[in-house]
């Protein structure tokens, strides 16, 4: 009992001096706005065409413009670090796995799985030395969180008229996360952690339309309305303080004490996103496209007592961005003319729910894509670099490299008559 009291006192006394990816430790973490590699390469939120002329893999309303059925996957690696510090933190994982089927240039459907927020973070304090009972003890404190909310989506695309289409997506939200506070005392970990499960659903309505077109220029407009159908709820498991004797990051029979109490609490309405987005794309005869996008995102959850490593969470976000995409021509003689080039700039402004503090993220994206084989197979690469900063807080720098592979096939074609 005495050592537990000592540990609690030290947890309160130690001051955080070194941190990594600290902004993901607010609430459920930072939400993602793009998933497919071609979208990341342009710094887009997925409305405007980035995969193929007239087509975004993140916008179901554009899928009838695909010539082939695609199964696609994107994988990324991101590093985060504090400016003027040599310490960085890396995390890798898939951005999206997707299957899309266009039907006769008018309809389409698809399914996908993707993470919709980034809850991964880790940061620690400097090690301090103090004398206790004539013995020198070394101690530092660590914070860690991971997991998050996933989305499984089913989407369909329908024509409204010859110049406009609509996409409807039903998204099932699920997943779990863990956040932990630990005291390291002479290399022994004393942990206090929480585990959460999630369940909810949202709906997206996407629109794509041609405003003007002739032989030289084409102007396209896009919009998206995101709504919560069932706010995310779940279960919170709160574990009492324990000594992780075997240092395996979880409680088991080898740890101390032999029994640890776990509080099980139902959590209701902790995440209910709503958003409105629109974008414009101007395409020229030489396959050069200029685009701009804007998004207002807000979490309408009524449960303001969601606890995380930091006792605050993201309440709203504003996105503005633009860029250029030059689509490659598969029929071109020179290989460099077959490559798709993408680049974009964006700015995200997050507002914390309780304190009203703002977090600014500025980013630059670049990417290339190359089609191969007769069915339009495509491999995409993207690189994103940027910074996140909050007043009276250190600036965080991040880099993200993403690779995506999309394999095409021919479906829903009329059978040829036998000769």
Image (cartoon, rainbow, N blue to C red):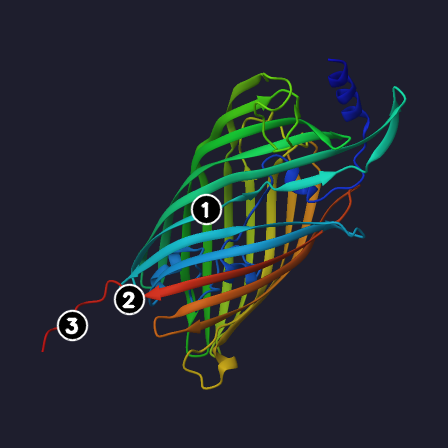
Mark 2–mark 3 Cα distance, whole angstroms, equals: 14 Å
Q: To which residue does mark 2 refer?
A: 410
Say which of marks 1 and 3 sits in front: 3
State the image quarter where residue 343 is shown.
bottom right
Residue 46, can we see it? no
Q: To which residue does mark 1 refer?
A: 225
Q: Residue furthest left?
A: 419
| Front residue of 172 and 124 | 124
Residues at badges 1 and 3 in contact (C-beta under 8 Å)? no
Image x and y of residue 203, in percent: 41, 42
Q: Residue furthest top?
A: 1
User: Which label's residue is closer to the chain start, 2 or 3?
Assistant: 2
Image x and y of residue 226, in percent: 46, 44
Mark 2–mark 1 Cα distance, whole angstroms, equals: 31 Å
Mark 1–mark 3 Cα distance, whole angstroms, equals: 41 Å
Q: What element carries label 1?
A: strand
Residue 216, can we see it? yes
Q: Residue at x 79, y 24 (%)?
A: 10
Q: Which residue is drawn at 50% across and 47% down?
A: 276
- The disc at residue 416 is 3
Q: Which residue is drawn at 49% across and 85% down?
A: 334
């Amino acid at each position: 009992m005495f050592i537990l009291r000592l540990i609690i006192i030290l947890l309160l006394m130690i001051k955080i001096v070194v941190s990594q990816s600290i902004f993901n430790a607010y609430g459920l973490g930072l939400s993602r706005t793009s998933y497919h590699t071609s979208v990341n390469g342009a710094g887009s939120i997925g409305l405007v065409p980035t995969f193929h002329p007239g087509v975004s893999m993140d916008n179901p309303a554009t899928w009838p413009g695909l010539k082939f059925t695609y199964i696609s996957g994107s994988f990324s690696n991101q590093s985060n670090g504090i400016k003027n510090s040599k310490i960085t933190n890396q995390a890798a994982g898939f951005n999206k796995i997707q299957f899309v089927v266009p039907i006769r240039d008018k309809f389409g459907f698809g399914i996908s799985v993707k993470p919709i927020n980034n809850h991964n973070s880790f940061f620690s304090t400097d090690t301090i030395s103090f004398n206790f009972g004539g013995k020198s003890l070394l101690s530092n404190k660590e914070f860690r969180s991971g997991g998050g909310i996933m989305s499984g989506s089913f989407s369909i695309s329908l024509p409204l008229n010859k110049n406009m289409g609509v996409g409807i997506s039903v998204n099932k939200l699920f997943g779990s996360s863990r956040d932990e506070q630990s005291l390291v005392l002479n290399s022994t970990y004393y942990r206090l952690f929480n585990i959460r499960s999630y369940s909810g659903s949202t709906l997206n309505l996407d629109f794509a339309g041609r405003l003007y077109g002739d032989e030289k220029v084409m102007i396209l407009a896009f919009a998206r309305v995101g709504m919560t159908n069932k706010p995310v709820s779940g279960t919170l498991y709160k574990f009492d303080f324990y000594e992780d004797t075997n240092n395996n990051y979880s409680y088991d029979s080898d740890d101390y004490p032999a029994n640890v109490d776990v509080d099980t609490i139902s959590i209701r309405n902790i995440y209910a996103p709503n958003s409105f987005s629109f974008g414009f794309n101007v395409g020229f005869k030489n396959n050069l496209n200029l685009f701009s996008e804007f998004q207002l995102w807000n979490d309408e959850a009524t449960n303001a007592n969601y606890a995380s490593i930091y006792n605050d969470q993201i309440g709203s976000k504003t996105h503005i961005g633009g860029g250029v995409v030059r689509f490659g021509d598969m029929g071109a003689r020179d290989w460099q003319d077959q490559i798709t080039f993408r680049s974009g700039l964006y700015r995200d402004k997050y507002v914390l729910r309780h304190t009203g503090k703002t977090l600014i993220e500025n980013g630059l994206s670049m990417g290339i894509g190359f089609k191969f084989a007769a069915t339009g197979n495509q491999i995409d690469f993207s690189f994103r670099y940027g910074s996140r900063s909050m007043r009276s807080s250190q600036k965080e720098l991040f880099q993200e490299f993403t690779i995506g592979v999309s394999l095409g096939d021919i479906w829903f074609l009329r059978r040829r008559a036998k000769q």
